[in-house]
Structure formats: structure tokens, C-alpha cells
Image (cartoon, rainbow, N blue to C red):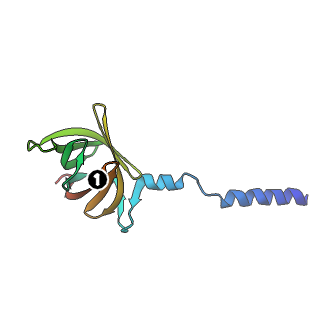
């Protein structure tokens, strides 16, 4: 009898003391808190962001990115060392600390390093980049 009570108490204690192993991942999916203390939410992306020079990814210089609802983003860019800017629409997704763009089989993945309004700090395997929010969605 005592052994049964002890076993039940031990199982109850184990269940109560366990944390959800995926809770951190779920929290990160909703927000990104940088070391500066500002909290970055997916909704903050909506609007127009200016890319600080040089933001050159795969030989293409990014000038600005306009994030729209529905997972679409218009990226204004030019080939490196070219002066003719053009805009292409990409699909984008934000999860945890990763921002991904995709279009016609090409993928760009950027890691969010930090956020201090109005600047968003990004990196990939080739460099570090900074973007600044210039206009909110709808403006």
C-alpha cells in the first residue's frame, strides 16, 4: 500500500515538474526578442523597409522590401554594379528567427540577429545586413 502511494506520488511529481519541450519553439515562432530588449513580431514586417548598403545577396543588390499581407513581398533590386532597378514579387515566411523568400525555385534564407526599432539586423552565410522600416503597411 505504501509502495503504491509512493509510486503515485512520484509519477504525479514528475508530471507536474515537466515543462513542455516545445514551448520555447512555440514562443519563438510568435516573437523574437533581441538582446536590445525590443520584441519583434511577424506583424512588424508589414510595410516598406529600406536595405542599407551593401545588401548584396547572390550578386543582386537589394534596395527595399515591401512586405504585404498574404505572404507576399515586393523586392526592389538591381544586379550588382548596375543602375537599373527592378521589382520582383516573392513569397515570404517568418518563423522563429528565420526570414525566407522564395520565387520560381530560388530561395533566400536570412537569420534575424536582432531588432531595435526601426532597424532589423539580419545575416546569412555571406554577411550581415541591416534594414530600416520606412513606412507602415497601408501608408
Query: Which residue is rendered at x = 47% and y = 56% of the image?
Result: 27
Left or right, 24 with reference to 128: right
Mark 1, Cα crowd under 10 Å, few <14 / some 14-19 / many 20+, is many
Q: Which residue is at the far left?
A: 83
Left or right, 109 with reference to 64: right
Quadrant of the image occupied by residue 58: top left
Query: Which residue is rendered at x = 80% and y = 56% of the image?
Result: 8
Q: Which residue is at the far bottom?
A: 37
Left or right, 114 with reference to 64: right
Query: Which residue is rendered at x = 43% and y = 51% of the image?
Result: 29
Depth check, front residue: 126 or 91: 126
Q: Secondary structure at mark 1?
A: helix
Q: Position of residue 102 (x, y in %)?
A: 30, 38
Q: Position of residue 136 (x, y in %)?
A: 21, 56
Q: Which residue is mark 1?
A: 45
Q: How many marks?
A: 1
Q: Position of residue 18 (x, y in %)?
A: 65, 58
Query: Which residue is rendered at x = 82% and y = 56% of the image?
Result: 7
Q: Which quarter of the rendered picture does the C terminus lie within?
A: bottom left
Q: Which quarter of the rendered picture does the N terminus lie within?
A: bottom right
Quadrant of the image occupied by residue 10: bottom right
Depth check, front residue: 67 or 60: 60
Q: Position of residue 100 (x, y in %)?
A: 34, 44
Depth check, front residue: 96 or 3: 96
Q: Which residue is at the far right?
A: 1
Quadrant of the image occupied by residue 3: bottom right
Amino acid at each position: 500500500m505504501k509502495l503504491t502511494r509512493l509510486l503515485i506520488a512520484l509519477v504525479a511529481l514528475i508530471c507536474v515538474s515537466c515543462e513542455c519541450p516545445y514551448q520555447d519553439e512555440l514562443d519563438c515562432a510568435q516573437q523574437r526578442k533581441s538582446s536590445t530588449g525590443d520584441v519583434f513580431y511577424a506583424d512588424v514586417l508589414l510595410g516598406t523597409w529600406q536595405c542599407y548598403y551593401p545588401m548584396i545577396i547572390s550578386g543582386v543588390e537589394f534596395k527595399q522590401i515591401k512586405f504585404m499581407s498574404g505572404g507576399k513581398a515586393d523586392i526592389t533590386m538591381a544586379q550588382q554594379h548596375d543602375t537599373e532597378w527592378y521589382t520582383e514579387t516573392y513569397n515570404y515566411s517568418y518563423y522563429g528567427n528565420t526570414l525566407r523568400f522564395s520565387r520560381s525555385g530560388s530561395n533566400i534564407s536570412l537569420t534575424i540577429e536582432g531588432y531595435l526599432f526601426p532597424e532589423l539586423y539580419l545575416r546569412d552565410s555571406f554577411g550581415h545586413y541591416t534594414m530600416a522600416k520606412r513606412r507602415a503597411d497601408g501608408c
